[in-house]
Amino acid sequence: VPRLPAGERNPLEITRRLGRTKYLPGRGTGGVGPPPPTEKLPARSGSSAALGTLYQLAVDMAEAKSQADLAELTVDALLAGTPGEVAAVIAVRDGGDLEPLVHRNKTAHAPTYHKASDFLSREVLSNRQAVLAEDVGGDRHLKNRESLAEMKVASLICAPVTADDQTLGLIHLYSTSKTVRLNADDLEFTLAVAHQLAVVWQKLRRQAGLSAEVRVLRDQLRLESELVGSSPALRKVEEQVARVAATKA
């Protein structure tokens, strides 16, 4: 956490832990270990349940077919594994535009959540570090933010989803409870979820890029090598080509 001159408070509690959490050990020796548990709240129990949630998330993500599917699975895991009541996944498009993929409220009868804090999003995009604020009402930089005040947010987490040195998206997690706030354990869990999301998200992006390239090449090949003729022998050749085209032969 950056140190400020005496008398100045840090605007947001930012924790640099994108490389290693207690759920996902870092690679190599350059990782930064987790900081001490929060002083405001005791460490939350239930690590085995959190690991179970992460395992199930990994299994489910392996079957995901789109970014929307991944986002749905992500918010479900966050709401199941933390006391957070509102979760969202936001995609960062080319040019830095933010596109909400999924918003979810744990309480069925609660008002629908339609937006995330733009201030938080820009803060995390700028620093590429996760943000934990355990007392939003006591933070002068957050308590008057319209979106947070409207939802009566008491504590929050915002984490980047990064892969190959690129920020693919953001995770927002909010709690309105003043007695059970999001804490350091929940930040650890959220970072682990963000890591799993980034791996599969990047894989889907690459697959989509390859599929688009294959379609372009097929179109070019069809234009450049159109078969001419309608004899039975030529039709047989075309049928064989069609069967082989979809394979790796």
Image (cartoon, grey):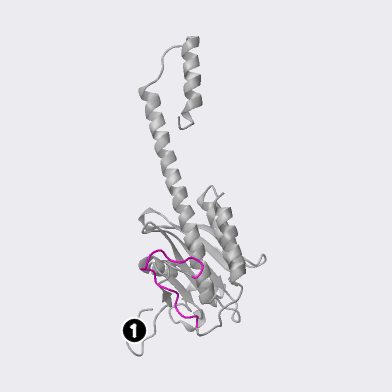
Seen as rendered, the residue at the extreme top is: 231
On screen, residue 94 above or below 7:
above
Q: Is residue 110 shown left or right of residue 64?
A: right
On screen, residue 212 above or below 78:
above
| Image position, residue 42 (x, y; %) | 56, 82
Instruction: Please report the bounds of the magenta region as a residue range.
Output: 22-38
For the N terminus, which image quadrant? Answer: bottom left
Seen as rendered, the residue at the extreme front is: 28
Whether residue 243 can be seen here: yes
On screen, residue 46 above or below 75:
below
Rendered residue at 39%/85% (across/down) = 9
| Image position, residue 144 (x, y; %) | 47, 78
Whether residue 116 can be seen here: no
Badge 1: how crowded within 10 Å, few (<14), some, or many (20+)? few
- The residue pinned by badge 1 equals 4
For the C terminus, which image quadrant? Answer: top left
Rendered residue at 55%/65% (across/down) = 87
